Amino acid sequence: MRKLAAIILSSVLVLSLTACSNNRQGETATQAPSSTDAPASTPAAGDNESEESTVTEGTASDGNILIAYFSVPETDGVDTVAGASRVVVDGEVLGNNQYIAQLIQQEAGGDLFRIETVQEYPGSHDPLLEFAYNERAEDARPELATQIENLDSYDVIFLGYPNWNADLPMPLYTFLEEYDFSGKTIIPFTTHGGSGFSRTIQRIQELQPDAIIIEDGLSISRNSVPDAQSDVTEWVAGLNL
């Protein structure tokens, strides 16, 4: 009888330890909103990124996919309650487009690539809005600080960006004019403050007329970014990659 009781007690302890381990794993995957974003017709700033200047290889087998994204950090004027434009994952603050890009990588595989410029953008909200507006008025082409060295190895390009002044950010013009995506498939995704894609998909088509542009891109409101995982999963599944 004592031997039987000892066996039962050991089984209960094993089950309890397993349950605790599973609970801790669930806790590391939580996301929480933080910060604010720009109004609908102005730069959707506030994408606070980690230092990621080169291609980051994914762990999935879909090596022909590149997930390129552009964002600018907005470092002050933070309201942690109002419209979120940053999310916190495992204690790390991620920008909107960075977070969506990572979710896409989880679903589709491929590599991450952050589009960066030589010039630094203002970290304050209002100066950033003015700077982006002036860039658009001047039809500027900011010099890029990062390059894709192995573009030929990619067939599918996910392209992410904020909606700035109902247009592509000007670094996206530089990016799309420097590379030839002929024959490749470009899949846009954007985060915004209410304007959706505006005419940015048409702009991409004009800049890359020989590429295959998927018009059914992913448009995520800044307020919905922290809870976007299911939307990303459904959208990627519908692409039939």
Image (cartoon, grey):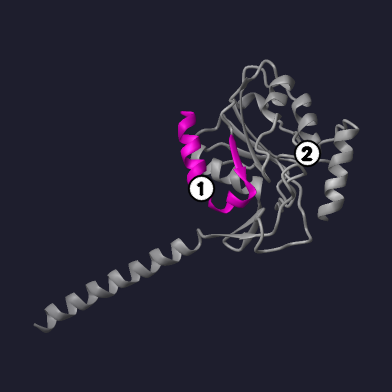
Q: Please say if 210 is above or below 224.
A: above
Q: Quadrant of the N terminus?
A: bottom left
Report the residue at 65% width, 56% height from top.
84
* Amino acid tagged 2: Asn
Report the residue at 48% width, 46% height from top.
230
Residue at disc 2, secondary structure: loop
Other-residue count near label 2 (Cα within 10 Å), few / some / many at <14 / 14–19 / ≥20: some
Determine the residue located farthest toward the bottom in the rendered image: 2
Other-residue count near label 1 (Cα within 10 Å), few / some / many at <14 / 14–19 / ≥20: some
Q: Earlier in the sequence, mark 2 or mark 1?
A: 2
Q: Quadrant of residue 125?
A: bottom right
Q: Residue 199, position in %: x, y?
A: 70, 29
Residue under numbered circle 1: 229
- Is 36 situated left or right of 104 in this image? right
- Is 150 situated left or right of 73 in this image? left
Q: Residue 239, position in %: x, y?
A: 49, 30
Q: Toward the viewer: 160 or 66?
A: 160
Q: Toward the viewer: 116 or 186?
A: 186
Q: Residue 188, position in %: x, y?
A: 63, 32
By secondary structure, the bulk of the magenta-drawn segment is best described as helix
Visible in this render: residue 24?
A: yes
Q: Is residue 239 magenta?
A: yes
Q: Residue 171, position in %: x, y?
A: 79, 35
- Structural distance between the alpha carbons of marks 2 and 1: 26 Å
* Amino acid tagged 1: Gln
Region of the chain picked out in magenta, as a range: 218-241
Q: Is residue 25 magenta?
A: no
Residue under numbered circle 2: 165
